[in-house]
Each structure stands twice: as C-alpha cells, then as structure tokens.
Amino acid sequence: MKPQNLVILAFLLLIESLISANTQAQVIPDQTLGNEKSSVNPIDTLNDRIDGGARRGGNLFHSFQEFNIKEGKGVLFANPQGVMNIFTRVTGGNPSQILGKLGVNGQSNLFLLNPYGIIFGKNAKLDINGSFLTTSANSIKFGDQGFFSATNPETPPLLTIQPDALVFTQQPSATIVNQASLKVPNQKSLLIVGGEIKMMGGSAIALDGRVELVGILDLGTIGLDEKFHLSVPNEIQLANITLTQKAKVDTASGTVILAGQKITLTDSSTIAADIQDNKNGQRMIINASHLSIQDGSQITSTAKEKSQGNSGGITVNVTERVEVIGSSKNEQDSKPSKLSSDAQGEGSAGGLIINTRHLSLEDGGKITSSTIKRSDGGSILINASETVELIGVASQRGRANDRDRASAISVQTRGEGKAGDITINTQRLEIQEGAEIVASTFGTGDGGDIIINASDLIYLDGTVSNNNPNNPIRSRIVAETGQELKVNDLPDPLIGTGNGGNISIDSQNLTIQNSAEISTSSSQETGNAGNLTIRVQNTLQSNNGTISTLANEASGGIITISAKDIRLRGNSDLRTSVASGAGGGGDITLTADSILAFNDSDIIASAKDGIGGNITLNTPIFFGNGYQATDQMNQNPDNLNNNDRVDLNASGAVSGVINVPDLTFIQNSLFEFPETLINTENLIASSCVVPNQQQTGTFILTGPDGLPTRPNHNLTSPYPTGTIETIPEPSPPKIDEPQGFYRLNDGKMVLSRKCF
C-alpha cells in the first residue's frame, strides 16, 4: 500500500473515532450573547430549529459551545424577515461534526465559523437557498466596525455591514474535512477556507456559481467582498488541499478558484467547469506551490456538446512543480490523468495557461485542448522557468490505441474550427520513452502550430514497445493532419482534410536520438503538411532520429534549419516528401558552420509525381560519409535507405535543385596513405638533449681542505668514499620517455629528454 494511502486510512480512522466520541453531542448554545443567546427548538423528531441570536441590521449572529448534527438529523436556522446573512461561531474548542442536514428556513447566506475544525460526514447535506461559507478562521472582520470572533467571543458590536475579511490568528489553522456532497443553489457561492482542506470522496457543487477552496497555514487576513469573492495575499503561507476517492468540484459555467500549498488530486477525483447551455464559462484559477494530478484525476474546462457558450479555460500559477501522472486503475475504462480545456459544442475552448518552474507529465499524463465542431480550439501556453519533462506511456488497461497511452501535450480539431496552438517557453525540454507534443486535425479545420523556445536544451529520446514491434511508440514533436478517427456518438469516422500546423523550435542545443522524431504531416489529398523551422545556437545532434515533413498528395512542408554545427549519425534522415499526386516536395535549407553526416544519414526532398524540393546547404564545411555529387540526385529515394552512405536526393516528376558547397579542394587533395604510415622504429631516438653551456662564475676557498656544509658540521673529505658491492648482471637497455618539447639551435622543435 502506498504511504499516501496509509496516511489517508489513518486519517479516516481518526475521523471515525471523533465522530463516535461525539454521537451524543448536539447543538449547545454558549452564554456569550447574553439575553440574545441562541435557542434550539424541535420541529419534529428529526429536525431542530435555531431561533434567537443577536440581530444587527441585516446580519444575525449565533454562538455555540458545541455544534454537531447527528446522522439522519437536521438543524435549520430561522430566517427572520430582512436578515441577509446568518453568522454561526463555535467557541467550545472541539471540531464540529456535520453528519446530517444543515439548512436555513429562508434566503439568507450562511457562515459557519469554528477555529477548531469542521468535519462533514458522507451523509451530510446543505439545505439552503443562499451562499455558504465554512471556515476554521478565528474571526470574521466587518470593516471598521469590529470582529465576530470564536476565540475571543464577545457580544457582537454594531456589525451591520457586509463582512470584508476572514482573520487567522493561530498556527496551524484547523483542518476542514468533507466527505459529503455539499451543494448550493445555482448561481450561488460555496467557499471552504481552512487550514488544510481534505475532500475525501466529498463534492463541492455550485452550478453556474462559484466554488473557492483556500487552505491557510499562516497567520493572516483573507479578503472577502459582497459577491463572495475571496482575495488571498501573496505573502501568506498556504496549507495543503487534497481531493481523494473520486472527490469532485463542479461549477458548470461558474468559477472555480483553488489556493493551497500543495494541491493533490488522486483516485479519479475531478475539478470541472463544464458548460451545458448557452452561457459562457468563467476562467478556472489554481494557485499553489505544487500541483499533482494522479491516478486518472482530471481538471477540465469544457463547453459540452449541446452548449452554445465558450468555455472559460484554466490558468495554473504554481511556483515550484506541476505534475500530471498516470491513469485510473479501472481495468475496463482506464482514463488518463489530465488537465484540459475543450470545446465539444458551438462555443470555443478557453485554453490553458501554466506558469511554473517545473512541469512533468509521466506514465500517460496529458495536457490537452480540443474542438469538435465549428468553433476554434483553445491554445496551450506553458511558461516553465527551468524544465518541461514528458516521460513514458500508461499501461494498456482499456486502451485500444497505443498513441492514446502516451504522455502528451496536445491540441486537436475534429471539425471546422482551427485547433489551438502550443507554446512552450522553458530552459530545458525533455521528451522520452514514447511521450509526445502533438498538434493535429481530424476535420476540415487547420491544425495548430507548435512553438518551442528552450534557452538551454531540447532532448528527444527513445521509443516504447507495443503490440506491433515493427512500429513502436516514438518520442516525438508532431503537427499532423490525421487519418480516420472514430469518435463516440458520431456515426462516421473523422478524416482530416485541413492543413497541418507548423513547428517552430528555438534552442541552445537540440538532441534527437533512438528513433525519436520531429515532423509535420498530411495524410489526405487536400491538406498541406506544415513547415518546420529549427534555430539552434550551438549544436543540432541527431543519432537515429528523424526530421521530416510528409504529404500524401498535397504540398510538402518546408524544412529550414540553422545551427552552429549539424551532426547526423546512425541513419538520421532529413526528409520532405509527397507520396503521390502533383504536390511539390518541400524545400530543405540548412545553414551552419559545419554539417557532418555519417552512417546512412540522408537528406531527401522528393515528390513522386510532382516537383522535387530544392536542397540548399549553406555551409563552408560539409562532409557526408560515402557521399558522391553524381548518381544520387534523381534516384528513387526508396532505394537510398540502408546503403551505408549519405545521400542527397531531390527526385520527382521534375527534379529539384541541390546546392552544396564546392568540395573539389578537398577531393583534389586526397591521397592514399602507405601501408606502413608510421615506422615505429624511427620513433626511438638514441640521443638526448644537452642544454647549452652558459659561462659560469668562480668560487675560491682558501684554507684547509674541505668545507663543512654548515658551520657546526664535520669537514668533508677531498676523496671519494663508498662500499664494495657485487657487480650487477647486465640489463636490457631502458627506453626513457620524453620529458617535453625542446628548441634546437636551428629552430627545430623536438620531443625528447635531457641528458644526465
């Protein structure tokens, strides 16, 4: 069992024990309101009504020592005429357990304040006609008029105005747990402001209204206006928000705002702002330091099939990391973890904006935007200051299409509308193990463009095996016009006839290897393949990688690459092609300080029945292993693969033009080396270097023989001394290694050593 699941289980057991210990506790008023204290009166055997309280203009205040509702029971607040807001505080120091029905006999908004925590059991429900705010704040602020406090309870002063803030004065703030389906009427607001917020199988629903979940860890003040809109200061420290066990937040065309430290969705939990009618959706906003979407959980903003309005889209502001990981555990209908903005009806998709430091998609996680009918799809904008990582594919549970399992950032159109664009701004982009960035059209609308700006590196690597070993899932960046696509609820499969999108890549370095690819394509007779533009400040390296544009019958896309150095190895092809029809092949233009190609890496611009594309190499240095300027221009490109040489080909019904640098100066300078290029015997010299003798000075000593090395040492002997030893056996001559380079008198430099 995962450690995270163990924590959740332990927390559930704690909640159950708290609930069991308080099964006898009910609603108990305290004495802080004096003669205006609240009273609890039975309506029937199942329901109680709360009367009394301190009336201040349109506000009514209640204060309780304990506030708990048993399962199957109901507590309703009386709603005197003219009262717009009912405020309830709990002062006894214990969490509130709401296991039954909580409501208002009228139209008033309801505020529930307990700084010691609130638990909504799985059978709890709301029965109100206004908005609902529940919080573990310490007090509610009313402008300059004062506070309604649960930790310093006093008779409320003249608090006649709308509240303007929630005040947290203790650390840590208490947790709010929701296991229930909490729902307010349409166009109303549901606000949950902790402490930690744990949505454990519960839901928060305000159709066409507003849901805000805000976790507060630090001391501070949260703004609140008369429209039930919260404002969270940037400097305040936030608490975690978790949605587990298929928890749900839903506002239809309304607003969703989450603000927390780490926001986590697991177990197929969802946050949705999905439009069903002709209303326009509001933008969903998520603010956190860490956002994690796992196990088939999804955050969506969608204009549904019968809707006329536009979806609001999603903005994610996460200071550290956004991660979208895996898929649901359902063996029959596995769904990917996803962050998406879609248009299924007549309205447009609102798109996605993600601002973070690190973005990670793993094991089939997805970020998508799509459109089905005449409306335009939403664009995806990713600003990741350090890294964007796409890694791997999901397991095959319930997935018929292998490509559907890939971790992906994608935009798509299936109708007349144009797909949105993908723009990624980052320092480093890595796509590995079958993951992809793709812009596609399966309709008459044009595909979206892909724009990638990486200040350091773009790295594409590898494949993942599948049911077809001859066609593994490749890591790729692709803009395509798709083949037939069967969509649920549509009688006929979709066939893409729009033009494919363009790809533009700017990076310091670009590496493509192990069957990875960057490509644009059009698989039908009418759609043109998009253009592909790559600008690399340093080195483009491709090792068994592919850069290509492909059109079935229409015009092929253009490839334009500029780099300091281009290195092609391991059957790495640059290719534009038109499979059939009169469409012209796309041009290929390479501009670099040097272009080196090895191991059957080909550059081909072909059109079977049209005009072959032109190939232009703007470089002072071009080397192609086995390349020959003749006999390659017009050959069938299908015959050029696996021939162990580098080919340049511009074939077609009318061949294109190939422009390469003049290499004759290299060809005319070539010569064959002798069989023995270096005689190693000549490398061993029988000489050494004697340093030039410089004129030396003279030191004369007069007096007795010998001179002590130090004044207190004995005199040295003028005769040599030693011991008698056996003459050693002769040994083979030793080869001494050279010590360095020396300049001779004639100016020559030699590698040698000094004579001893």
Image: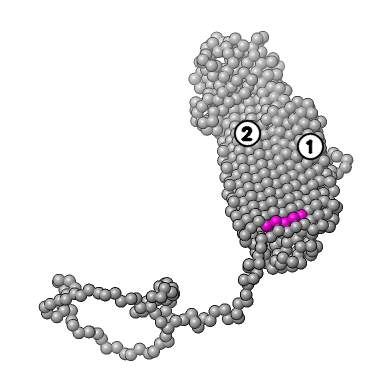
Figure quadrant of residue 341: top right
Along the horizontal axis of the image, is 727 left or right of 338? left
Q: Amino acid at mark 2?
A: Ile
Q: Nearer the viewer, residue 581 or 276?
A: 581
Name the residue at 46% across, 81% down: 684
Q: Position of residue 269 (x, y in %)?
A: 69, 37
Mark before the other along the chain sequence, 1 or 2 = 2
Identify whether 134 is placed above or below 265. above
Q: Nearer the viewer, residue 320 or 12?
A: 320
Name the residue at 58% across, 35% down: 288
Range of residues picked out in magenta: 613-617
Q: Secondary structure at mark 2?
A: strand
Along the horizontal axis of the image, is 233 left or right of 491? left
Q: Position of residue 306 (x, y in %)?
A: 81, 31
Residue at numbered disc 2: 286
Residue at numbered disc 1: 417
Q: Nearer the viewer, residue 724 or 217?
A: 724
Q: Within 10 Å of the Cα at label 2, are there few (<14), some (14-19), or many (20+) other Cα atoms?
A: many
| Residue 44 showing in the rendered view | yes
Along the horizontal axis of the image, is 572 left or right of 134? right
Q: Position of residue 716 (x, y in %)?
A: 18, 79
Q: Amino acid at mark 1?
A: Gly
| Residue 330 showing in the rendered view | no
The verdict on residue 120 being magenta is: no
What kind of secondary structure does the magenta stretch mostly adopt? strand
Give the spatial CA distance, label 1 vs label 2.
28 Å
Name the residue at 20% across, 75% down: 698
Along the horizontal axis of the image, is 96 left or right of 305? left
Figure quadrant of residue 371: top right
Please tell me whether mark 1 or mark 2 is closer to you in this view.
1
Identify whether 555 is placed above or below 23. below
